[in-house]
Image (tube, rainbow, N blue to C red):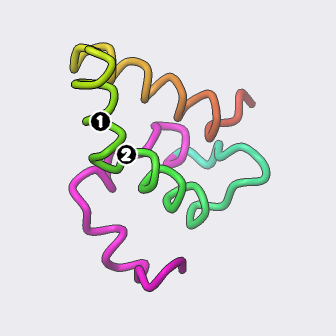
Amino acid sequence: MGRGTSTSSRRSWPGAAASPRGWRRGRLAAPWTVETATDMLWGLIATDLFERLLTGRAWSREALDEHLWTLCEATFVSAE
């Protein structure tokens, strides 16, 4: 699990259902498992990352959304 965070609490955060579409279609890229990819995505969408990009770097919410999903799909979803 990782640093005292249970699987059930990780899966209960609001974005848990919003995983890249390929995960639900069995297209998770190697070497990821659903659990490790969920852990990584959970870490990537920490609010301090949002704050840094939105405030510190003046990104729009639309740009953050677009770039985050592009990153996630390119990293976690297999092209096959």
* Image quadrant assignment for residue 56: top left
* Residue 48 spot, x, y in % from top left: 31, 45
Q: Is residue 31 above or below residue 60?
A: below
- Quadrant of the rendering where the C terminus is positioned: top right
Q: Is residue 50 left or right of residue 66?
A: left
User: Mark 1 and 2 residues: CB-CB less than 8 Å, in contact?
Assistant: yes
Residue at 58% across / 61% down in the picture? Answer: 34
Q: Which amino acid does label 1 sit on?
A: Phe
Q: Which amino acid does label 2 sit on?
A: Ile
Residue at 25% across / 15% down in the picture? Answer: 62
* Residue 47 spot, x, y in % from top left: 27, 47
* Image quadrant assignment for residue 67: top left
Q: Nearer the viewer, residue 25 or 60?
A: 60
- Quadrant of the rendering where the N terminus is positioned: bottom right
Q: Which stretch appears magenta?
A: 1-24
The residue identified by callout 1 is 50
Q: How many labels does the image show?
A: 2
Q: In this view, does 13 lie above or below 9?
A: above
- Structural distance between the alpha carbons of marks 1 and 2: 7 Å
Residue at 64% across / 35% down in the picture? Answer: 75
